[in-house]
Image (cartoon, rainbow, N blue to C red):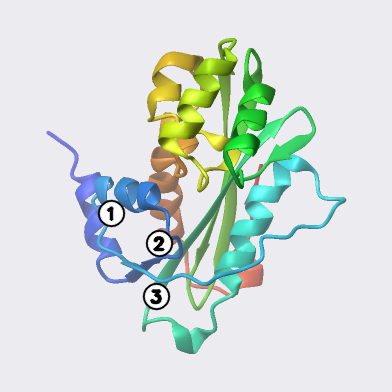
Amino acid sequence: MVSSDGCMVLEQLKSYNVVLASKSPRRQELLKGMGLDFSVLTKDLDEFFPDHLPPTEVASYLSRVKAEAFREEELPENYLLIAADTVVIVGSAILNKPGDIAETIGMLGQLSGKTHTVATGICLRTAQKTCVFTDFTEVDFAKLSHDEMEYYAQNYRPFDKAGAYGIQEWIGFIGITGIRGSFYNVMGLPTQRLYNELKQFISEPKQTASETSRIDL
């Protein structure tokens, strides 16, 4: 007998007004691919974080900041808000979004021939509770030539992407030699992990945010 568990979860989620707090077309595409009905609601925020925060905790910190930026009256009735933030970590440094061609080439140079970590933090929020978690993927890059980095920067202009690249674009096809973890996490949303977290989140008793909030790093 085939389990209907997946369909049951999607049916249960229909009782919520799911809101994605992200302008990212990649996150929207991935959430649609998961079969969720949702609306998009965003705010322009300065993505600052404390200097003392370990790099592995930055994504979860920023996802929570994004989720908590909304007042209750700004959200639909019976909402389930999904906020996310993705960072690229090289050693102890975080690579943000590049501002121009030169910064793109510089960041790609830092990734070239090395292994880096992509961390996506996600905050789930309802009126009753909050859950925060982070998913990590290790990505291996081959040694890239200056011509390859310049070609990608000029033709794809990845100024909206942390770490200055999209794994689903040309640079991913020719430059990435391996990954350990979720491919979709590198795109901005760890879909399998998110599905399991949503499944647990909506099945838990409705309590206060302080009682159910957790960070899983």
Residue at point 68% right, 34% down?
A: 89
Q: Is residue 111 above or below residue 42?
A: above
- Quarter of the picture containing the N terminus is top left
Q: Position of residue 127 (x, y in %)?
A: 50, 78
Q: Which residue is mark 2?
A: 202
Residue 58's spot in the image, x, y percent?
70, 49
Residue 9: mark in rendering: 1
Residue assigned mark 3: 79
Residue 23 location, x and y as percent?
42, 60
Q: Amino acid under label 2?
A: Ile
Give the structural element (helix, strand or loop) at label 2.
helix
Q: Earlier in the sequence, mark 1 or mark 3?
A: 1
Label 3 vs 2, first from the N-terminus: 3
Compare residues 107 and 117 and report the one nearer the observer: 107
- At label 1, the amino acid type is Val
Q: Alpha-carbon neighbours of circle 3 within 10 Å: few (<14), some, or many (≥20)?
A: some
Q: CA distance from mark 3 to mark 2?
A: 12 Å
Nearest the viewer among 189 and 115 is 115
2 and 1 marks in contact (CB < 8 Å)? yes
Q: CA distance from mark 2 to mark 1?
A: 9 Å
Q: Is residue 165 left or right of residue 191?
A: right
* Residue 96 can be seen, yes or no: yes
Q: Residue at x 69, y 24 (%)?
A: 110
Amino acid type indicated by mark 3: Tyr
Question: Badge 1 local density, few (<14 within 10 Å), some, or many (20+)?
Answer: some
Q: Which quadrant would the C terminus be assigned to in this image?
A: top right
Between 112 and 180, the residue placed more toward the observer is 112
Among the 4 quarters of the image, the one containing residue 163: top right
**10 Å neighbourhood of mark 2: few (<14), some, or many (≥20)?**
some
Q: Is residue 156 left or right of residue 142?
A: left
Q: Which mark is residue 185?
A: none
